[in-house]
Image: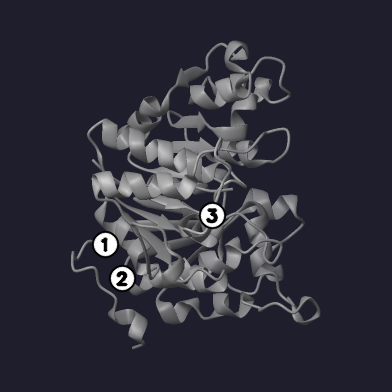
Amino acid sequence: MSDMDMEDDGSGIVKKFMFLNRKAPHGTVYALEGLEVVLITAAFDQDVSLVFTDDGVYQLMKGIDTKGIEVKDFSKTYRALEGYDIEKLYVDKTSMDARGLTEEDLIVDVTVLSDDEMKNLMEEQDVVISF
Amino acid sequence: MLHIVNKSATERSSLDSCLRLATKGSAVLLIEDAVYAATKGNAAAAKIQAAAADLKIYALGPDLAARGMAGRVLDGVNVVDYGGFVDLVAEYRNCQSWL
Amino acid sequence: MQFGILVNEGPYNHQASDSAYLFARTAIEKGHKVPRVFFYHDGVNNSTRMGEPPQDDRNVTARWSKLAEEHGIDLVVCVAAALRRGIKDELLAPGFRISGLGQLVEMGIQYDRLVTFGD
């Protein structure tokens, strides 16, 4: 058990949190700083769904090598999410298709959702935070 | 669900993503640069009018006025002030900002 | 109803902080509560008292401070995002404080709505 597992707001409330990642990595900081929020939310024992759509699907590319641009490679963190009890990882099929990507291109196992499945998942959330 | 869009539809694809994933009966509020999409003659106007069949479309009046667009709003788009914005957030059980 | 507000962009460069401020002020005028506003990403730049906008422009930071003082709003600046950008305690305008991301998560857990303003 890590220190982060000890977080508790004292209310005992568990809400459905969706993080909707829509931005490519590195061009802006949103993907990296968004991931930090995801980890903290899981530490509060909330019901977390992590969804990648639009350019956000690029965050999960295999073979990312950031040495040449001298910034942190945080893509490995996605592979550690299970350790934080974050197991609901989804990508949006329409966004994958529009970028010529398939599940084999991605660094982690994900569930691929149709537009209708995406809609249903969003509607059932209590809190949606988009980066 | 309330969907909030703040990007110009002629510059970014946020509006398209929102309209693709908004469930029938939900609301879309256009604020900041997104309000141009709700005006007559804009390239996105047809999308907004088609979407209005299944979604409630709102645009923030102060943002329209600040951009000289108050007199060009499409039929079927509801113009709201900040009070209306607050009411929409309260009315729908969750919201998503398509940043 | 209790609204949490998340501001993800700094002042002046983007309208996000202005929109968030007007939303918060209006919500309070309508009888809702805004117990906390959380500043993340470049939004942490809203918290510095070092800004000196021209006299004919609004002072985004001072406006947040005043609203917070009048209505008891907790203006929380993310510590990790702030340290990255050189925002320190000694630079904070009145009403702002630096704390962890847990404060953002708490808004989602405890309040009725969480509204995000950004770019």
Q: Residues within 10 Å of mark 2 (few under 14, many from 20)?
A: many
- Which residue is under mark 3? C51
- The three-letter amino acid code for the residue at tag 1 is Val
Q: Nearer the viewer, mark 3 or mark 1?
A: 3
Residue C62, given in percent of the width and then of the height, sits at 42, 48
Q: Residues within 10 Å of mark 3 (few under 14, many from 20)?
A: some
- The three-letter amino acid code for the residue at tag 3 is Gly
Dot placed on the residue nearer the N-terminal end, 2 or 1: 1
Side of C91 relative to C109 (left or right): right
Side of A97 relative to A126 (left or right): right
- Which residue is under mark 1? A14
- Give the camera-side residue of C47 and C9: C47
Marks 2 and 3: CB-CB under 8 Å?
no
The residue at 73%/38% (across/down) is: B11
Q: Nearer the viewer, mark 2 or mark 3?
A: 3
Q: Chain of mark 3?
A: C
Q: Chain of mark 1?
A: A
- Quarter holding the N terminus of chain C is top left
The reply to the same-chain question for discs 3 and 1 is no
The residue at 73%/24% (across/down) is: B43
Q: Chain of mark 2?
A: A
- Which residue is under mark 2? A45
Element on which disc 2 rests: loop
Please give the label number shown on residue A38: none
